[in-house]
Image (cartoon, rainbow, N blue to C red):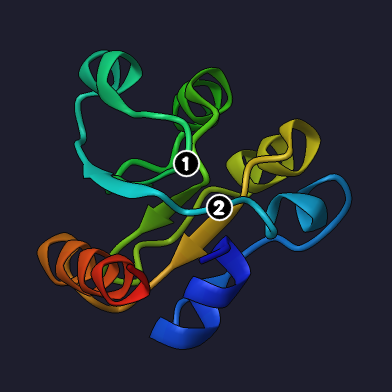
Amino acid sequence: MTVKEMAHKLGYKIINNTDPVAEKLDAKVTGVYACDLLSHAMAKVNEGDVWITVHTNLNVIAVASLTNCACVMIPENIDIESQSIERANDKGVVLLSSSKSAAHICLEILSALKDMK
């Protein structure tokens, strides 16, 4: 399942859809990881993961870029700083948003991935 397919299927909002981000919407989602401690996420997020975090600062974009995660999901409709959206556009990091909690999002994504097998 790609990021775009997942967002459509589960009703997640795609925050940024400009070049070079648009091509990243075709990245394969292979897992999900929820963590708000940036240094820990940097060590544990795998390529292809949807990384769920409540943080929206520039450091999130740096960690996402370093880990090559499929996308960053911001739960609970938390506002995303405009600087972070601009940096995500520059770095090709897909940002998603949902009104749901991080726990609910994890369950949805894992269930969707399980159904794909």
Please state which amino acid type lies under the numbered disc 1.
Gly
Residue 68 in the image, given as x and y percentages of width and height: 55, 29
How would you rate the neighbour count of disc 2 (Cα within 10 Å): few for under 14, some for 14-19, many for 20 or more?
many
Which quadrant would residue 49 be assigned to in this image?
A: top left
Q: Are marks 1 and 2 in contact (CB under 8 Å)?
A: yes
Q: Give above or below for 42 relative to 81.
A: above
Please state which amino acid type lies under the numbered disc 2.
Lys
Q: Give above or below for 22 relative to 81.
A: below
Task: Residue at 14%, 72% (x, y): give it.
Answer: 104
Task: Residue at 52%, 45% (x, y): give it.
Answer: 70
Q: Name the one closer to the observer, 14 or 46.
A: 46
Residue 73's disc number: none
Residue 79 in the image, given as x and y percentages of width and height: 43, 61
Residue 60 in the image, given as x and y percentages of width and height: 45, 31
Residue 44 relative to residue 42: left or right: left
Q: Secondary structure at mark 1?
A: loop
Pick whichever of labels 1 and 2 is earlier in the sequence: 2
- Most extreme residue toward the left, as rendered? 103
How would you rate the neighbour count of disc 1 (Cα within 10 Å): few for under 14, some for 14-19, many for 20 or more?
some
Task: Residue at 73%, 39% (x, y): give it.
Answer: 92
Count of picture labels:
2
Q: Name the one closer to the observer, 61 or 68.
A: 68
Residue 100 in the image, given as x and y percentages of width and height: 23, 76
Which quadrant would residue 95 be assigned to in this image?
A: bottom right
- CA gap, disc 1 to disc 2? 6 Å
The residue that disc 2 covers is 28
- Quadrant containing the C terminus in the rendered view: bottom left
Task: Residue at 68%, 59% (x, y): give it.
Answer: 25
Q: Secondary structure at mark 2?
A: loop
Residue 62 relative to residue 45: left or right: right
The residue that disc 1 covers is 48
